[in-house]
Image (tube, grey):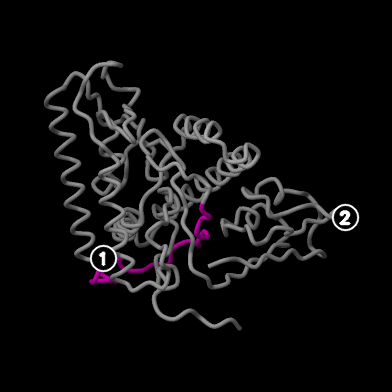
């Protein structure tokens, strides 16, 4: 999917809001009007549509295989190809549908395998907690991990999406969560815009990438699944990153640990190698692609934050099921 972006010059008042908010600089000001000079770079996030108070911007989807979105970092994310691959477009709010697990029974074995992996992660966390009870400080009300910046693999995102719909298929609480998710996603879009510009200006240097990763790890973004008491409303179905946050982990041989824990710097502790977990998640995402017979060969490479996982409609169009629709 890509996007055909148009600006109605008669409606555009030249405020420049779309120029400022676009993370990949699609728009330029020409003769006092906004122009989609780089429409081919559009991610489909629709931030420009939301900030335009005069309804001057219109986007039409054009079918094409989805490229991959890269994980944008955070202390627990091991992928470093941030912004080297173009993201899949942002999708609109979910319609009310049954859980994906019930809609696509062919995916049940995949989600069952994912739940088994989750159980393994929980067992590891419990074991480390038993070995070092004074170091693991996770407790109800501590939401440090709920403000970390990280992305989900396809299998994690679809699973969380299905469980969200299962619990909140209708009503004001669902609307509140989705409103928060939209707000968070716009904030992430702006952060990605800044990271994109920094990396572009540095011509993709490793130093710039390391700086971006460090900044992303420090970023504090409140998860849209937190309620007013800082409790996760989908705690039983939270991603693996959330489950392992409070114990030592390693990515590419580099150790990380929650700043709220009591693990001592430089000491030796049992450490979870997230690279191995990510490999298994990747394989499950590939299995989803194959089971639904997606025409999008890179579907399994799509990574999204929790906010977008909640907002995305994982329907046939998104998953690339069936023949591509003909252009009208």
Identify the residue under disc 2: 31
Q: Tell me where residue 148 sits by quadrant.
A: top left
Q: Which residue is drawn at 65% across and 68% down?
A: 4
Q: Does the magenta stretch include residue 182?
A: no
Residue extent of the magenta highlight: 85-107
**Image coords of residue 129 (percent x, y):** 16, 28
Relative height, residue 165 to residue 150 (above, below): below
Q: Which residue is more in the foreground, 225 or 211?
A: 211
Relative height, residue 267 to residue 19 (above, below): above
Q: In this view, does 232 lie to the left or right of 7?
A: left
Q: Main secondary structure of the magenta part?
A: loop
* Alpha-carbon span between mark 1 and mark 2: 52 Å
Looking at the rendering, in which quadrant would you find the C terminus?
A: bottom right
Q: Residue at x 56, y 56 (%)?
A: 45
| Element at label 1 | helix
Q: Residue at x 40, y 70 (%)?
A: 315
Identify the residue under disc 1: 101
Q: Residue at x 31, y 69 (%)?
A: 290
Relative height, residue 43 to residue 239 (above, below): below
* Marks 1 and 2, the one that precedes in the sequence: 2
């Amino acid at each position: 999917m890509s996007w055909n972006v148009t600006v109605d010059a008669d409606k555009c008042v030249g405020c420049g809001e779309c120029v400022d908010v676009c993370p990949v600089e699609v728009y330029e000001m020409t003769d006092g009007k906004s122009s989609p000079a780089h429409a081919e770079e559009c991610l489909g996030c629709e931030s420009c549509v939301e900030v335009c108070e005069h309804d001057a911007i219109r986007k039409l989807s054009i079918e094409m295989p989805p490229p991959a979105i890269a994980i944008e970092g955070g202390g627990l994310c091991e992928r470093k190809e941030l912004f080297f691959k173009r993201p899949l477009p942002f999708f609109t709010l979910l319609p009310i549908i049954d859980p994906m697990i019930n809609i696509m029974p062919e995916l049940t074995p995949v989600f069952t395998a994912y739940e088994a992996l989750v159980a393994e992660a929980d067992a590891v966390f419990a074991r480390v907690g038993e070995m070092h009870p004074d170091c693991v400080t996770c407790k109800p009300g501590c939401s440090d991990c709920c403000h970390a910046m990280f992305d989900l693999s396809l299998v994690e995102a679809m699973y969380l999406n299905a469980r969200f719909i299962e619990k909140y298929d209708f009503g004001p609480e669902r609307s509140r969560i989705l409103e928060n998710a939209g707000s968070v996603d716009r904030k992430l879009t702006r952060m990605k815009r800044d990271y994109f510009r920094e990396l572009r200006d540095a011509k993709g240097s490793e130093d710039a990438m390391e700086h971006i990763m460090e900044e992303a790890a420090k970023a504090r973004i409140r998860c849209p699944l937190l309620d007013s008491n800082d409790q996760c409303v989908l705690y039983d179905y939270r991603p693996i990153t959330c489950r392992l946050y409070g114990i030592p982990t390693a990515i590419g041989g580099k150790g990380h640990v929650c700043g709220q824990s009591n693990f001592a710097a430089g000491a030796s502790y049992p450490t979870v190698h997230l690279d191995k977990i990510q490999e298994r998640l990747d394989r499950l995402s590939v299995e989803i692609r194959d089971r639904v017979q997606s025409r999008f060969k890179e579907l399994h490479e799509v990574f999204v934050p929790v906010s977008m996982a909640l907002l995305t409609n994982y329907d046939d169009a998104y998953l690339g099921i069936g023949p591509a629709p003909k252009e009208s």
